[in-house]
Amino acid sequence: MSAPPLAAAEFLLSATDPARIGPCAAEAAFVGRSNVGKSSLLNAVCRKDIARVSNTPGRTRTINVFQVSHGRWLVDLPGYGFASGPQAERDGWGPMIEGYLTGRPGLRMVCALIDAKVGPTKLDLMMLKWLEAADLPWRAVATKADQVKPSRASAQRRDVAQALGLQAEDLAWVSAKDGLGLSGLRAELTVWLDS
Ligand SMILES: Nc1nc2c(ncn2[C@@H]2O[C@H](COP(=O)(O)OP(=O)(O)OP(=O)(O)O)[C@@H](O)[C@H]2O)c(=O)[nH]1
Ligand SMILES: [Mg+2]
């Protein structure tokens, strides 16, 4: 049976303790630094405003689960790097996100969001290393691509990909604002949730 469209997604639950989130068949999560556009991207792929968005970094403070169909979830996570400085770097992204990511057997894909214009920060690179070490599948997604001048876009995509050790075509290049790249990402999400 093929999965229903992502537009069927509805808010299911919020949690701060990942151990209290029950099992599911398949889920895909959005991670990235505060303000990179995780909640906006979730809304954009679902074509509805279900996740809360804000100009202020640190908007999403809990693990927020959206159900596409029974047991098939999209998960919006709090951002990292909000409190900057050496302490924050040592702390990584904290027990909540780490606990979630390591405790989900149904986690099919981690969409790792990177700002298309800024490129990967030190914390972004640490996060990817961590995902690799934890043996979790991840997909690099460059957000806010509308903020890169069209004349710079292909060079910037190549540079950001290179900084991540990827080829340009292995870096999804999306904008929640103008819809760039969303249909491809929707198709991927549907496949992951269907598996
Ligand atoms: N230009 C542009 N702005 C965007 C895009 N996506 C998100 N934004 C803006 O970026 C800001 C942060 O967006 P959020 O979706 O709340 O970011 P987040 O990663 O969920 O942030 P936290 O929940 O704090 O971790 C908001 O002001 C959004 O309007 C995009 O594709 N293009
Ligand atoms: Mg958010």
Image: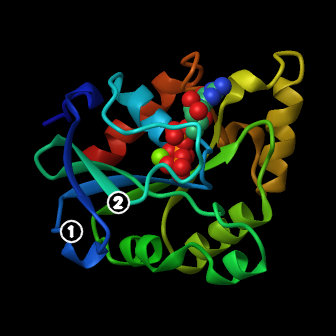
- Image coloring type: rainbow
Q: Which mark is residue 63?
A: 2
Quarter location, residue 171: top right
State whether residue 132 is above or below residue 58.
Answer: below
Kindly identify the residue that appears in the image at 34 percent across and 62 percent down: 107
Separation of marks 1 and 2 at Cα, in angstroms: 9 Å
Q: Secondary structure at mark 2?
A: strand
Amino acid at pointer 1: Ile
> For this view, does 70 lie left or right of residue 36?
left
Amino acid at pointer 2: Ile
| Observer able to see residue 149 | yes
Query: Which residue position is annotated with label 1?
Result: 21
**Mark 2 and mark 1 in contact (Cβ < 8 Å)?**
yes
Instruction: Judge the density around disc 2: few (<14), some (14-19), many (≥20) Cα neighbours within 10 Å.
Output: many
- The earlier-in-sequence mark between 1 and 2 is 1
> Cβ(mark 2) to ligand 2 < 8 Å?
no
> For this view, does 174 lie left or right of residue 155?
left
